[in-house]
Image (tube, grey):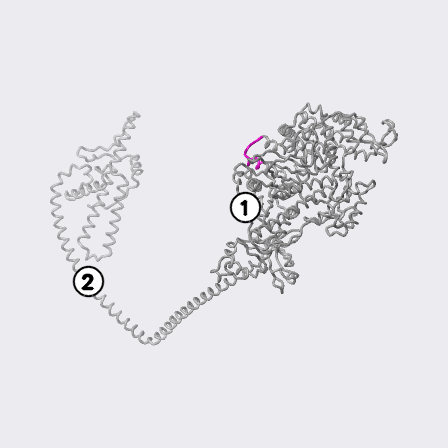
Amino acid sequence: MDVGYKVWVWDEERWRAGTITAMPAHGDGDGDGDGAAAELVSLVTDDEARKPLQARAADLHLRNEGMVEDMVRLDHLHEPGVLANVAQRYALDEIYTYSSRILIAVNPFRQMPHMYNEMMMAMYRAVPIGELSPHVYAIADASFMAMAHGGGADQSILVSGESGAGKTETAKLIMQYLGALSGKGSDVESRILSSSPVLEAFGNAKTVRNDNSSRFGKYMEIYFAEDWSIRGAAIRTYLLERSRVVKVAEGECSYHLFYQMIDGAERRLQRMLHLENRSPSQPTSKPFQMLTAKGGWWSKTLRDSKKDAQEFKRVMAAMEEVGISQVQRDNLLMVLAAILHLGDLTFEEKTDEHEKSEHHSNEGAAIDKKSKEALDHAAELLQVPSRELEKRLCTQTIKVLGSNESYERPLEIVDARKSRDSFNKALYSKLFEWLVRLLNASVGGVTKQAIDTHELDDSQDEYGTFGYSIGILDIYGFECFEKNSFEQLCINLANEHLQQQFNGQVLREEQELYKAEGINWKHVSFKDNQDVLDLLQGRRDIRIAGVFPTIDEHCRLPKATPAGLADSLKKDMKQQEKFFTIDKAQMSFGLRHYAGDVLYDCTELLVKNADSVNADHEELLTTVSKSQFVQDLFQMHRAAGDHEASKPQAGAGRRHAMYSVGLRFRDSLTKLMTSLKQTQPYYIRCIRPNTVMQPKQFRPGYIVEQLRNGGVLEAARVISAGFPTRRTYDELLARYNLLAQRYQHLDKKDQVKKILQAGRIQDFELGKTRVFMRAGALARLEASRIQARHAAATKIQAAARGKAQRNQYRKTLAAIACINKWMRGALARKRTRKLRGIEEKQNLAAAVIQGAFRGFARRRALQHKRDNLARSQAEADEAARKKREEAERKFNEELQLAAADQAVEKNVDILGGLDPSRVYQRVTLLKEMLMAIRVDNAEDVTQEAIMDLVEECQRDQRVLVTSLNSADPAKVSEEALMQALSLNDRLVTVNTLYEIKLRALEMNFAQEEAQSARARNFPVNPGSVIPISRGGQASSAPAASSSVQSTRQHSLGPTMPIGRRPQ
C-alpha cells in the first residue's frame, strides 16, 4: 500500500471507501510485516463527509476496479470486496452473481418478467456456466446436463436464505425450468408443480419479514426416466413450526390455509365446519382466538379477505389436480376447523356445578361455559363425545410404576391450556405429515398402498426411488435473533452440516483444479467446523457430551428444569473453545458458529424437545373417534413412531423410550446429508437486501450478515486459504508485460515467471494454463506495475521536459538577437540624425526659396492665360452679337409673314399691342411649352404644371442674374444677353398661360351658374357671362362678379406677377 491507494476501512459498523493520505514513518507499508501493521495509516473517506480516519494497515483492504460476474475473479477477495461487487450489480438490476459454486440471488422485491420466460429458458439451455450472465436457469441447466451427460450422477441444488430472501420463488423457478427442459408435459409434471401451492397453504405464513415465509424445510427429489422425462418426485419435510398453530406473534399470522378457509369456504362448507359469521369481511364477525394476537389477524392491514378467498379456490383446485378427492378435502378441512374451535376453549376452576372427578372431587380445571359451543363444534368435527374430549383436555392419566394400574390427575388451568395447545399442535403436525405422504403418492414418490398399509421400511426409506434424480433443498438459512430457542438450535445445526459439506466440496474442487493444472495442492490448508458439530451432537470418543444429548437426557428426568439444563451445559461444556456463557444471562449459553456467535435461551428447550403426542390425546383420536380419517392420521404416526423408537440412538448403544423432536430431526438430517453426499451439489444463497421489502434499497450491514450466514464469506475464506488469485498467462502478460520487457524472446510461462520475480512474488504456482498466487500477491504485483509505470513516466517526462526547455532556449536566443538588431538600428539612426542637423537646415532654406520662385512663376503664367481668355471672349461675343442681329432680322421678316395666320389663334387678344414678330415668337414659345407638358389646349393646363413652370423660370432667372452680377458689364457676351432675353420671353409666356387658364375658369364658372339658375327658374345675370366673339376675342363684358373673383382666388390662389410684360 502507498499514498493514493483506494481501500476499504471498517468504521461505524460498516465498510467505508477511503483513500490513503499518509503512510507510517517507517515500514514498507505492504501490510506483510508486523511493524507495518502496527503503525497507523491515515486516510480520508470518499463520501461527501470526507471524514479523516486512522487504521492499521492490516485492517485495510484494497478496493477492486469495476465489477465481475464471479467473485473468484476479484483481484482482492475479501468481505468488503464481495459486498461492493454485489451492491454494484444490484444497482444495475443484476440480481444474480456467482461465487465459485454459489449463486447469490438478491431479492429485487418486484416483478421482473423479462428475466423469466420461455426465451430466457431457451437461451440458457445447454450453455455451460459462465458463458452467459449469472442466472438461476444456468444452475438448473448445469445440474440437468451434469446428470444427463455426466454418467447419470444424481444432482442436488441447495437453496437457503433467511425469511423473505426469495427461497420459495427460486425453488419454483428451478422446478419450472426442469419441467420445461424435459419437454414431455406429462401429468406427473403438472402434479409436481401443483404440489407447491398446496404445501405453501399448509406450511407458509405471514411474518414480520416476509408475507409468504416457509415455516418448514423441504427437500424435493425429482426423478427422471432414461429418456430424461420427469417420472416422479419425492418430498421430504423438516422441522415444521408447530408453535405457530397455537400462538401468533404481534404483526404476524398463522398458516395461510386457516384464513383462506374462513374467507373462501362456500355455504355448504361453512355450515358443515361451523364457520358462519367468522370471516373478517362480515361486520359482526367473531374472530377465532388462536388467530388474533396483538395487532394480529383482525387488523385488515395484515390480511386481504378477497385475496384469501381467491387463494382458497386455487388451493382446492391444486388439491384436486394432485389427486386429493372431495371426501379427503372435506375431512382435511374438518380437522382444520376443529383446531380453530379448540383454540377458542377457555378454562376455569372446577366448581360444584361441574362433573366431579372420581378421585379429586373439587380440584383442577374445567371448560368455561362460554366456550361450550366451541367444544361441541370441535367434538362434532372430530367425531368424539364432547364430555370425553373435555375429560382428555382437563386430566392426565398417570401409570403406576411396576403395575398395570393408572389414575387420572386433574390439571390446573395453566396445564389445561398447555394440554389444549399440545392437542392442536399434534393434530396439525399429523395432518401436515399425512398431506406430504399423499402428495408423494400423487407425484410418484411413494405408493398409495404403502400409505394405506403403513408398510415403510429402511430399504424403501419412506420414498420410492428411480434411476436419476435432481434434489432441490429449500431450507432455512442461519438464524440469530434477540431470543434464540429450540428452532434456531436445530436450524443452525442443519446449516453447520450444510456448511461443512460445502467447505468440503469447495476444497475438493480446488484440489481437483490444482491437480488438473499440475501444481502442488498440498500447500492448501483448511480448517472445518467439525468441532462445532461435535459440540452440538456429542462425541463420546473425545468425551464431549453434546448439547442435544444433554437436552434429551434432561427431558427423561422427572423433575428437570430449564435452570438445571443451563447449569449442566455450562458445567459439561465450559472447556470447549466454541462454547461460551454470559454472566448476565444465567438461563442462556452461547455457541460460536461459522457465521457468528449465537446466544440460546434455555427456557423452552425442554418443552419443545419433548413435544410428543400425549398418550391420552392419541388414545382419544385412535380409539374413541368415529372418523376413520382421524384414526388414520395417528395410526400412521404410531406405526412410524414404533419403527423409529426401535432404532438405537447414534453412539448410545441402547434404546430410548422417548423419541424426542431433536432426535427425530437429527435422524432426518443424517438421512438428508447422506443423500446429499451421494449427489453433485449446487448452491444458491438467497439474499434479502432490506427489511422493509422495498425495491432499490440496499443495506450493506444487513447484507454482510446474510453473506456470513449463507457461507459466502466462508467460501471466500476457504478459497483464500489456497491460491485465490488465478490468472491465465495471456491475461497476466497483457497487463504486466512491462515488468519483463527484456524477456520478450522467452515463452509465455517463462515470461510470467520473470514478471512474478520482478514483482517480488515468492509463493506462486505455474499451472498448465494459468498461474496461481496467494492472497495479496496481486496487490504487490500491481504495486510493482505502478512503480514501473511511474519510472517509465518519469523518464518520458524528463525527455519531454528537456526537449521543451531546449526549444524554449532556442526561441529565447532568437528573440534576444532580434531585439539587439532593432536596438542597434535605433541607436545608429539616432546618431545619424545628430550628424545630419546642418544639412537639414540647408535643405529647409532651399525648399523655401524654391517655393517662392515656383509661386511667382505660376502666378505669372495664370495672368497670361486670363488675358488670352478675355480677348477670346470679347471676339466671340462680338461675333455672336452680329450673328444674333442677323438672326433677329431674319426672324422678324418671317414673323411678319406669319402674323396673319396666327391672328386667328384662341386668346390672341392677350398678345395684342405687340408687333407681329413678337406675337409669332411668343405663340411659338407657348406651343413649345404645351408640348413639353403634353397638353393640347392652354385651358387644360393644371395649376400644378403652371407652378412648376414658374419655379423653373425663377430658378433659371436666379442663376442668370448671379452670373451677370459677378461679371464685368462691359464684358457681358452676346450669348448671355440672348439667354436673358429668352428667359424673359419664357416668363411672359408663362404669365400669358396663366391669364388664359384664369379666363377659362371664369367662363366655366359663369356657365355653371347660369345652368344652376335655369334649374331653379332664376333669371340669369347677363353680366356673369363673358361673351366670346367668333374670332376668339373676348367682348367688352363687365367684370366678373365677386363670386367669380372669390372662386378664382380659391382655385388658383392669389394672383401675382410672374414676369414683367414688355411694352
Q: Of 420 and 663, which appears nearest the observer?
A: 663
Q: Quadrant of the N terminus?
A: bottom right
Residue 627 location (% of width, % of height): 73, 25
**Residue drawn at the location 21% of the way across and 40% of the way down:** 930
Q: Which mark is residue 865?
A: 2
User: Which residue position is annotated with label 1?
Assistant: 130
Answer above or below: position of 657 versus 504: above
Q: Is residue 156 left or right of residue 423?
A: left
Secondary structure beneath disc 1?
Answer: loop
Q: Earlier in the sequence, mark 2 or mark 1?
A: 1
Residue 743 location (% of width, % of height): 49, 61
Name the amino acid type tagged 2.
Lys
Secondary structure beneath disc 2?
Answer: helix
Q: Is residue 121 left or right of residue 197?
A: left
Q: Of 242 and 951, which appears nearest the observer?
A: 242
Q: Residues within 10 Å of mark 1 (few under 14, many from 20)?
A: few
Disc 2 from disc 1: Cα separation: 115 Å
**Residue drawn at the location 21% of the way across and 50% of the way down:** 980
